[in-house]
Image: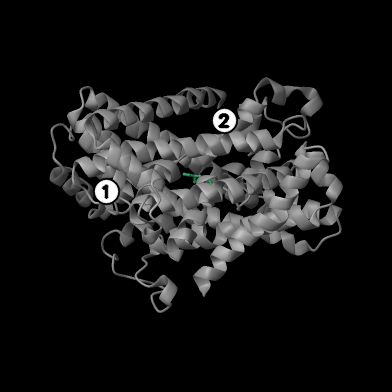
Amino acid sequence: MTDLVQNAAGDLAADSSRKDHPMWSSRLAFILAASGSAVGLGNIWKFPYITGENGGGAFVLVYLLCIALIGIPIMIAEVAIGRRGGRSPINSMRQLAQRDGLSKRWVWIGGMGMLASFLILSFYSVIGGWALSYVGNAAQGAFVGADSDTIGAMFGGLLADPIALLLWHSVFMLLVIIIVARGLSSGMEKAINILMPLLFVLLLVMVGYAMNTGNFAQGFSFLFQPDFSKLTTEGVLTALGHAFFTLSLGMGVMMAYGSYLPKKVSIVKTAVTVSVVDTAVALLAGLAIFPLVFANGLEAGAGPGLIFQTLPLAFGQMSGGVLFGSLFFALLVVAAVTSAISLLEPVVEWLEEQKGISRFGGTLIGGISIWALGILTILSLNQWSDVYPLGMFERFEGKTFFDLFDYVTANLMMPLGGLAIALFVGWFMSKQAGENELDLGNGAGYRLFMFVLRYITPAAVLVVFIYNLA
Ligand code: PHE
């Protein structure tokens, strides 16, 4: 992370007064980096498909509630821990626990987060590979005039081909490894700062297209008209887990980013901004996709292939679709890469700290192990699509390796990590530290935030957990 930020912070990092620990050059630099981590496949690929699988509106409402009552408070707490600790997640936790005379066990938040990063990136890279292969498809005009059967067969063909999947997964992982090994260059940083807003604009174009040609009214009401009869307890857990996944919470990523945040920046405002941007991208993706789903008689619950089976239909029919389509998938890859960097970074940082390995060596060891683990996800999509490693437990019935990695990280590990973070800042960290970091003064704003963090956030996570286990 140090390299990444040193470069990202540009001139300021070179400022001699800051040489002990580099800082983000501005609040904006932090917002861009944190949004880069948050906005990714979670928003454009995962949110629409889990919304489709869980019946729409009621699920979206629960997800939004989870963002507001659980996600935002935990993001604030996590960034605050990072800024106060000023180190990698594991060492920040160690440092803070020591300073306030608390148990060393809190370090486990960092450890579990690192394991979650490892597991998530192994499948995230495979999906990033899908997006990469679709850049090629779009550029070659494979979508032009294609109907939904052709588009569906194209996606099915990709999943059925482990060699192609392995190839794209390798390319994606290689990109991430190169960037993390070298640190994010300031040129790349500038490029990302242009490309991400461009992705946003392109999503708006797609929503515009969906308004004109799709079944917009039906798509809109699917997303925003809650029908609680469609919501299951499992769906509520999925919504909760996704709030963590999409905001990159509960595993130390935001802690690491927070350690570079200058003291004068408001954590509260910043966390709210990042969460709003992230949520807006997800909702726009939903508004672009569901009108197409209904206009073309597709299945909202089609699963992980949803965006790959709907958006190409639009690109195949709209004018300039070859250009828009290639650009869209390329930008999706960029969004995925900026998230993937934040997933590999903690692993590399830990390898560097623990074993005295060089950054380059750490990136290679971490990257290659994650790449290898990704093969299990690839096989889950074809040869091993009916291998259910934990099938003997009712909870994990019918889940492939891929399903398990996704489920265990998003629905269990991240909420648990987030719960621990909320409890740490709410109940254990010294009151003065909280007041110092949170710039809410010690008046009503501070008391309200602490009330939410101490009671509402942990209770919400626990209630969802207990309902699901019962
Ligand atoms: N938030 C990212 C996304 O929505 C995924 C991610 C999860 C990144 C956890 C970092 C940590 O795609």
Q: Residue 215 carries which label?
A: none
Counting residues from the start of the chain, the first of labels 2 and 1 encountered is 2
Percent x, y of residue 320: 23, 22
Q: Which residue appears at 16% of the width and 31% of the height?
A: 144
Disc nearest the viewer among 2 and 1? 2
* SS at mark 1 in the image: helix
Q: Nearer the viewer, residue 304 or 268?
A: 268
Q: Nearest the camera: 464 or 114?
A: 464
Which residue is disc 1 drawn over? 164
| Depth order, front residue of 57/242 | 57
Res 378 visible = yes
**Residue 35 point in image, percent of width and height:** 54, 35
Question: CB of residue at label 2: within 8 Å of ligand 1?
Answer: no
Circle 1 Cα neighbour tier, 10 Å, few/some/many (<14 / 14–19 / ≥20): some
**Image location of residue 395, percent across then percent down:** 44, 72
Above or below, 318 against 283 in this view is above
Q: Name the residue under label 2.
A: 32
Q: Distance between the residues labelled 2 and 1?
A: 33 Å
Q: Which amino acid does label 1 sit on?
A: Ala
Residue 333: which quarter of the image?
top left
Instruction: Give residue 335's position: percent from left, percent from top.
Output: 44, 36
The amino acid pointed to by label 2 is: Leu
